[in-house]
Amino acid sequence: SHYIIEQKRGYMLFLVSQNSLDLLISNPALSQCAMGISPLSKNISDLRHITQEAFVALLQRFFVPESHGAFRFPENHTLPDFTELDTNYDKVIANIDLLNEEEVRKAVKKFLDFDALEECDYAQCLFYAYNKIINGLLKRYPKFHPSDTYLYLKGLMIENITHVATLKEWKTYVLDYILYLLELLRSQQGKYAYVTKAIAYISQHYKEDITMATVANYVSMNYTWFSEKFK
């Protein structure tokens, strides 16, 4: 028996018994499919947790030679330290806000370079980065996403990571999204040039004792007007 939790094109999330799972794994018709398997649980309150574990297990396929078959989430695992990933993500966002394409490219490459992370389970780090992008980047600029069709479609391609053949392909979608977003932000630069200038000043002097009035004076704007616009 099984219970379907979620179903999309080319992807299905469902609950099965141990016996049914053994039959699925041994079924020749499914030999070319990739299956992410969570540890067993008898508690329905664990549903969200085991769903996440199954998704993380499925992401293991990007880091092994054979991208199909059964991938199990380890029974005994420790949560990695995501501090470095957080730092690298913050650099991506900071350079997007500064409209610095060269530094954005470098920051994105470093953020998505999981091989460079020390003592980090690749699949768990990918899942963490995936969530930072889905719940952070894709929601950070609502003026453009989802109103811009290209950006919206790229966002869907990023979200549907289970559909891509390789991790390289998914990383390309992420970079394409960010570079296109950068162009949209640049198109607004002429109208709101003071914002870019203010952000650059804050990023360089954030450790100092600066106030809204300090920044307004730097960009030569009226304090009252600036404080209303720059929030």
Image (spheres, rainbow, N blue to C red):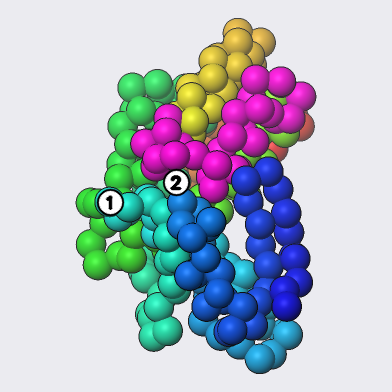
The residue shown at (63%, 51%) is: 11
Question: Dot 2 surroundings within 10 Å: few (below 14), some, or many (20 or more)?
Answer: some
* Residue 213 on the magenta segment: no
Q: Which residue is mark 1?
A: 65
Question: Dot 1 surroundings within 10 Å: few (below 14), some, or many (20 or more)?
Answer: few
> Can residue 64 be seen in the rendering of this structure?
yes
Residue 176 appears at what percent x and percent y?
48, 24
| Of 154 and 218, the residue lying toward us | 154
Residue 113 appears at what percent x and percent y?
30, 45
Label drawn at residue 148: none
State left or right for residue 4 relative to residue 192: right
Label drawn at residue 90: 2
The residue shown at (64%, 36%) is: 156
What predominant SS class does the magenta segment belong to? helix
Per the rendered image, the range of residues in magenta is 145-172
The residue shown at (39%, 85%) is: 76
The residue shown at (34%, 59%) is: 122
Residue 213 vertical position relative to residue 29 in the rendered view, above or below: above
> Can residue 96 be seen in the rendering of this structure?
no
